[in-house]
Image: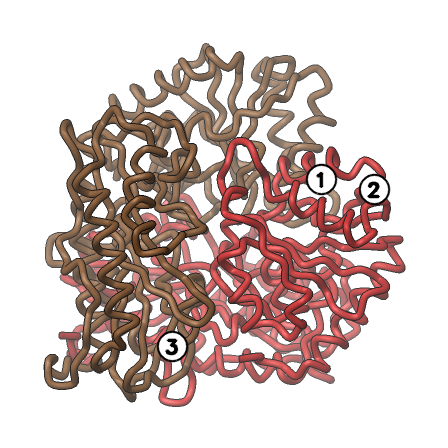
Chain colours: A brown, B red
Amino acid sequence: MLPFEVAEYQERLERVRKNMEKQGVEVLLITDPANMNYLSGYDAWSFYVHQMLVVDLSSEQPIWIGRFMDSGAARVTTWMHDDYIIGYPDTYVHSDVLHPMMYAADILKLKGLGNKRIGVEMDHYYFTAKAYFHLQKELPDADLTDADLLVNNVRLIKSDQEIEYMKKAARLAETAMTNGVNSIRAGKRECDAAAMIYYHMIAGTKDISGDYPAIVPLLPTGKNTSNPHLTWTDRTFQEGETVIVELAGCCKRYHVPLARTVTIGAPSKLMAGLASVAVEGLNKVLDGIKPGMTCGEAEALWRKALKKHGIVKESRLGYSVGLNYPPDWGEHTASIRNGDRTVLKPNMTFHLIPGLWFDDYGMEISETIRITENGCETFTSFPRELLINMPSAFEEHGEIS
Amino acid sequence: MLPFEVAEYQERLERVRKNMEKQGVEVLLITDPANMNYLSGYDAWSFYVHQMLVVDLSSEQPIWIGRFMDSGAARVTTWMHDDYIIGYPDTYVHSDVLHPMMYAADILKLKGLGNKRIGVEMDHYYFTAKAYFHLQKELPDADLTDADLLVNNVRLIKSDQEIEYMKKAARLAETAMTNGVNSIRAGKRECDAAAMIYYHMIAGTKDISGDYPAIVPLLPTGKNTSNPHLTWTDRTFQEGETVIVELAGCCKRYHVPLARTVTIGAPSKLMAGLASVAVEGLNKVLDGIKPGMTCGEAEALWRKALKKHGIVKESRLGYSVGLNYPPDWGEHTASIRNGDRTVLKPNMTFHLIPGLWFDDYGMEISETIRITENGCETFTSFPRELLINMPSAFEEHGEIS
């Protein structure tokens, strides 16, 4: 079931160990499910209970510690030997007496790691404040240190195989967007469009099956286009409305996000104008971005293009994207924004999302890109413009029985 | 857009304040998105950045603190006045210099709350270890205390309107399960069945639209039925295989989970026998469970039924369920398991999931129930048995265009 050669996992591990040495981390406890997957292959919806991957400088294989019920999934989805997979009993799950970190601490002590300098992912969703305090209490001889984003930083530059999965994810994004946009018509409900997006995102194509994306399709409509993170409702689309669709294709947990704005019927002059500003700015970045530049310098291309139209965007233009699990497909490392000094390198991948949000309207037209040797290329091939759903322009699509 | 009367939110808040007083908490910082929704109505996919609801004993309305980009969503989805909605700048998002909790601490100080006894949700996904340490540093006069599950405990007993939404969610679970099971046939891919489940789960019925569930459909197949939290792949179903489908209908963020096991073709004697054991045990619980009993006593009904077949289930039988966001639809409070002393009361709701998992096969047949005045009732009405997909028993369903 492994999506990569074992050698690729081992090479990633090598780079993580180098970062550990640089940061003075002897043992790394990895609780971010994307980081766990990146190093071990582990893939299951089990991150709602405490679990981790333990990487230490001296052992050849990481140790998976999770719920006993999920240890079978660890055996089938990872490359490690069964001896490196350790399940804790169900009595540790959502208990007010026992905590999985007590169990994990016991394992660390048993392996002779209880007195090491131990890195933890301090700002990751799946490493709670209580998890920290249990480790601190149970490992009095350890030195807990912040290793947040240590693995995420290793993930910044993608391998060729990772890029291949992102290319497949792009095909999924295209089919989901095409079918989703096509079902945004007056009289249909928002949930009907979301259902159509989901169907095509997951069924994919004959050759590419879709995984669940780390963020659900976002579908702000009408005045709510000013609120980018709203999902669908049971409302019926109205003639003349604007709808934003933000989604991602996901293949082997690798994401390619894509956002477009659709008007039902002819767009207002305001909306058409805003779209041309967004596309013009986005094109400036796509034309000018290249390796060697910093993320901040890339953002300046966008800001300069916007400035002459008198528009200032408060939020960042983009962020590093790739392998992920809910709740976010962003990697939390490099952002395309003012002041970010990350130097762009080939095979870095970003979602550039020039969202322009005002008090009661908004607009998104995005592209996911790969930095190449000389510039960049977009993953998806989809009209980079305001989409206009004229009633006559689309055939009625089939209904599912 | 509010799914409940303002009075219901205020009554919930009153019960939370009572719990705060009991636990000696003057100010409560709520980071669990389900708890935020429960008290304010807030509903957006923004929990991948730090955000919170601040409840203090003296103020009439809670304060929402989140990303500036999401403050519009807070204005349209909550009942609070705009003055109680405070957005932090985008420079605080995934930054290595600024942290949203620095901003939140400033707001707390400004409101005169910086020297209070402040409760935080210590073991919730969206309250990280780093969030805790930033608050501790920025609020040296505060007394931070663990208030994990304080609001979750208030959520245990559902209101009549909450039960109404769960009844609608049950209709969604039924249509998703019917269509999902129908598409599990030899030659189809796992992703095709998952896509069909998603379509019907979200498009719902003419009158009920579906929300995204807090857990994606789980679809372990063949030998992997022993690994309950695996999702679908691009594999093709084979004649003779067993497939587990676990999904939930979700309405206004209220969940009704449902799990069934399907065989493609006639089942093995082992599988048929296992199913009858599971159903017999589940029926014993459905017949015997009633208010006044503890959760532990309810589980004993199941354990006793299983014991005579020589089977021991390591994991809990069930857990409290209702309002939620990814990554879990469980409420992390009462579990139907040995030793849980929570006393059952009318309008508590549980997912009873007698999953039986062995080394290379497994079985799930579940029901979500409401505790009534005298016993319990199931939300869904779906054959409580091993489902058998004989090639002739199903008409070919339509394809989506």
In the displayed structure, A113 sits above or below A237; it is above
Chain for mark 3? A
Work out how far the residue at label 2 is from the one at label 3, CA to CA, in angstroms: 43 Å
- Three-letter code, disc 2: Ala
Which dot marks residue A222? 3
In the depicted structure, whether residue A361 falls above or below residue B32 = below
For the residue pair A179 and B93, the one nearer the viewer reads as B93
Residue located beneath label 1 in the image: B135
Kindly check if marks 2 and 3 are in contact, taking CB atoms under 8 A apart as contact. Answer: no
SS class, disc 1: helix
Q: Residue at x 47, y 37 (%)?
A: A32
Q: Is residue B290 visible?
A: yes
The amino acid type found where label 3 is placed reads Gly
Instruction: Tell me the amino acid under the disc marked 1.
Output: Leu
Nearer the observer: mark 2 or 3; the answer is 3
Q: Position of residue A44 (x, y in %)?
A: 40, 46
Would residue A217 be found to the left or right of residue B156 on screen? left
Q: Dot 1, crowdedness within 10 Å: few (<14), some or many (≥20)?
A: many
Q: Is residue B231 left or right of residue B351?
A: left
What SS does tag 2 mark?
Answer: loop
Rounded to the nearest angstrom, the CA distance separating label 2 from label 1 is: 9 Å
Circle 2/circle 1 CB separation < 8 Å: yes
- Label placed on residue B142: 2
How crowded pointer 2 is (Cα within 10 Å; few <14, some 14-19, many 20+) is rated as some
